[in-house]
Image (cartoon, coloured by chain):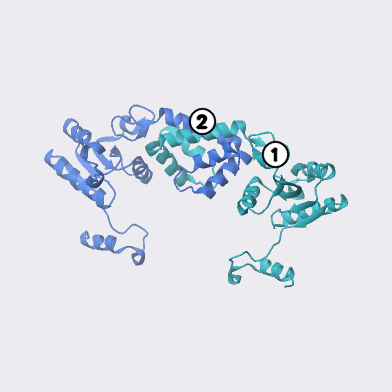
Chain colours: A cyan, B blue
Amino acid sequence: MFSPLIDELINALRILPGVGPKSAQRMALHLLERDKPGAAKLASSLQQAIEHVGRCKLCRTLTEQDICATCTNPQRDSRLLCVVETPADVLAIEQAGNYSGRYFVLLGHLSPIDGIGPEDIGIDVLLERLQNEHIEELILATNPTIEGEATAHYLAEQAKRLEVRVSRIAHGVPLGGELEYIDGGTLAHAFNSRQGL
Amino acid sequence: MFSPLIDELINALRILPGVGPKSAQRMALHLLERDKPGAAKLASSLQQAIEHVGRCKLCRTLTEQDICATCTNPQRDSRLLCVVETPADVLAIEQAGNYSGRYFVLLGHLSPIDGIGPEDIGIDVLLERLQNEHIEELILATNPTIEGEATAHYLAEQAKRLEVRVSRIAHGVPLGGELEYIDGGTLAHAFNSRQGL
């Protein structure tokens, strides 16, 4: 409908998660009509990030360095290692702000149905670290989904064999949540995992 | 929180309309983790569009040519000229698919309070076209807002002075709309503008 370059830009914007044809069109026209400097900035940031951002060689999170800032920070407790599924999970935990150990990012979860085994999500690398480094506690923070739970279970078995202490983050009713609106599964879990006062 | 390049990308994505900090983060991680080729395509489309897309010299819509495809198309009726506020409006009318004339894009509306007068939205250029070209009808399709109505009113006065026929697109209850949910202003307008059957 528009000229080819504009159509191409609209299509390119549709790869962004949550952006459909109408939003992509609105974004393209906004950038071209009102914010060409912003668009140029976006193009160069994308280019830079594509070229330079890779995986941390230790924890596998996204970073432009060989080893990320968390892994090299001497103030982080190297005896604690928290296992998460994605770099976004690292960010969420960092924003909560009370964890001072290090991370290991699986970049996925075990999923035999999709052919994803332990090696595909770096569990071999993780077990090697458990053997070679002085890690006192492995904190499992995979998602509370079927695959996340299975992954946590598998990791717990392996870590126990290496005699490393393992823990799983607590699941239950979120703070500020109202019981009325909490799903049955969570509520049942909260009852089963109740703690003495 | 992330490494500098990723933070920069997240900030750059926030210039997109409707994208807040959380969506920008989700977009950046999605691109870097799962769709680097798509991100590269987006960067180059942005670059291309910024460099080459400008205004059509005749109708002022966005195009990468000097004169856009609608203005050069000999099958469009050059006797009809439709005035709209933005390139997105041109697209909306084209998608409706029953208008075969040409366009003039104001790229805004009269707004004395913001210091936007007739020359700022190209009305001088439009009046020149009305004088020099054989235009039989000027169709005013500015938005039905206060500023859009004022702009339409001003244009109607000027066009009448040049003895060009002027029309305004109809306003009223949209097709498929339910009276129950239509705002009072629209409904009042629909009654005042009722037509004999």
The residue that appears at 65% across and 34% down in the rendered structure is: A65
Closest to the observer, B84 or B32 = B32
**Side of B16 relative to B138 (left or right):** right
**Type of amino acid under label 1:** Thr
**Side of A154 relative to B142 (left or right):** right
What is the chain identity of the residue bearing mark 1? A
User: Mark 2 or 1, which is nearer the eye?
Assistant: 1
- The residue that mark 2 highlights is B44
Residue A62 location in percent, x, y? Answer: 65, 40
Label 2: which secondary element: helix
Residue B140 location in percent, x, y? Answer: 24, 45
The residue that appears at 54% across and 49% down in the rendered structure is: B22
Label 1: which secondary element: helix
Residue A135 location in percent, x, y? Answer: 80, 47
Q: Can you tell which mark lies on residue A125?
A: none
**Type of amino acid under label 2:** Ser
Residue B32 location in percent, x, y? Answer: 61, 39
Compared to A113, does A41 lie above or below? Answer: above
The C terminus of chain A, quarter of image: bottom right
**Side of A58 relative to B98 (left or right):** right
The residue that appears at 65% across and 54% down in the rendered structure is: A98
- The residue that mark 1 highlights is A72
Compared to B44, does A177 lie above or below? Answer: below
